[in-house]
Image: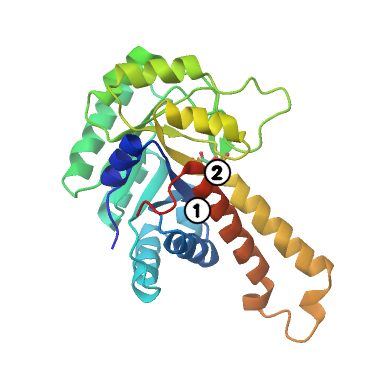
């Protein structure tokens, strides 16, 4: 069954760990993340960007695929299906399509407009029992066409958005989508601590989970981060494993060209990455 992310994040906040959001791209990705969550007895959030939603033939298709897999694979751990960096229109689409959680990313609007639009999305999502994530400041880099300046969040603005009644808040603290550059300054823990203080312990979201050193991840969790998003790292492990298979000529041996064989190493590589992250975030055994 799909669930809202609210309960799993409240428990994570209280228990001092974080739940991973793993972005999905296709059937292999979804199956790999769901099976790993079940094997690790961990709650999990499946992230769907607007680009990935389009690629997978629309949000209704995604809902059908995820619900079908939960049923057919016997997945019993809590699973939230969440729109990642949703636009105003995209948020309404997933509310209609049957997602269980939504991020409305109004960070590129002026704060007054971000507040007004977030308020509206909260009302519409609440009517369906969904959880809501909002964003203040901006995550740097680019993800699926969403480009962010990397602006560090203003804690006063974070409080205004949190007070609207969102369930989780993404505050820009120097984090970036994709690989981190050599000269990256690191996460801004002073701002993170301030945001947690003014939002009264609200579960905070760390985007750009790929490539953040383990000690920074642990410190972020200790300062209130309860959800960590990972996308690029699964893509990199998938690509490396499939490349190795092809470079070894395995696609030319026997029926090695069968897509179920060709994509299997990538599938196993995603599983290994997801397991590693669940262990690091501390969500193993917390379902
Ligand atoms: P990465 O691709 O850097 O892991 O970021 C994922 C993310 O934040 C999704 O919103």
Which quadrant of the figure has residue 119? top left
Q: List the single residue furthest toward the bottom.
A: 254
State the residue in front, 218 or 32. 218
Q: Position of residue 96 (x, y in %)?
A: 26, 53
Residue 11, position as x, y percentages in the image: 30, 42
| Residue 144: image tag | 2
In what element is the residue under mark 2? loop
> Disc 2 beta carbon < 8 A from ligand 1?
no
Q: Earlier in the sequence, mark 1 or mark 2?
A: 1
Q: Residue at x 40, y 59 (%)?
A: 41
Pick the quarter of the image with the N terminus.
bottom left
Instruction: Note whether 227 is above or below 161 in the view shown.
Output: below
Q: Is residue 67 above or below residue 176?
A: below
Mark 1 touches mark 2? (CB < 8 Å) = yes
Label placed on residue 52: 1
| Of 65 and 113, the residue lying toward us | 65
For residue 211, say whether it is visible. yes
Quarter of the rendered structure image containing ligand 1: top right
Please tell me whether residue 8 is drawn above or below residue 271 in the rendered image.
above
Residue 99, x across and y down, in percent: 31, 54
């Amino acid at each position: 069954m799909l669930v809202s992310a609210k309960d799993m994040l409240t428990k994570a906040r209280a228990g001092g760990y974080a739940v991973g959001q793993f972005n999905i791209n296709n059937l292999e990705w979804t199956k790999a993340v769901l099976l790993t969550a079940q094997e690790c007895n961990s709650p999990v959030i499946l992230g769907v960007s607007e680009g990935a939603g389009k690629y997978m033939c629309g949000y209704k298709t995604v809902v059908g695929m995820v619900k079908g897999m939960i049923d057919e694979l016997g997945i019993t751990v809590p699973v939230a299906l969440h729109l990642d960096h949703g636009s105003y229109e995209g948020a309404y689409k997933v509310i209609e399509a049957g997602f269980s959680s939504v991020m409305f990313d109004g960070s590129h609007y002026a704060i007054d407009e971000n507040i007004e639009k977030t308020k509206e999305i909260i009302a519409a999502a609440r009517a369906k029992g969904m959880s809501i994530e909002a964003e203040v400041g901006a995550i740097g880099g680019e993800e699926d066409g969403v480009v962010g300046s990397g602006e560090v969040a203003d804690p006063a603005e974070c409080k205004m958005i949190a007070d609207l009644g969102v369930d989780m808040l993404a505050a820009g603290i120097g984090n970036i989508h994709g690989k981190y550059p050599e000269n990256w300054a690191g996460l801004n823990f002073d701002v993170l601590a301030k945001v947690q203080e003014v939002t009264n312990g609200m579960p905070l979201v760390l985007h750009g989970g790929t490539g953040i050193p383990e000690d920074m991840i642990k410190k972020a969790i200790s300062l209130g981060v309860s959800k960590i998003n990972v996308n690029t790292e699964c893509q990199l492990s998938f690509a490396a494993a499939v490349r190795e298979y092809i470079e070894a000529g395995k696609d030319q041996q026997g029926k090695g060209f069968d897509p179920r064989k060709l994509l299997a190493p990538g599938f196993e590589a995603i599983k290994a990455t997801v397991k590693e992250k669940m262990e690091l975030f501390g969500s193993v055994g917390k379902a």
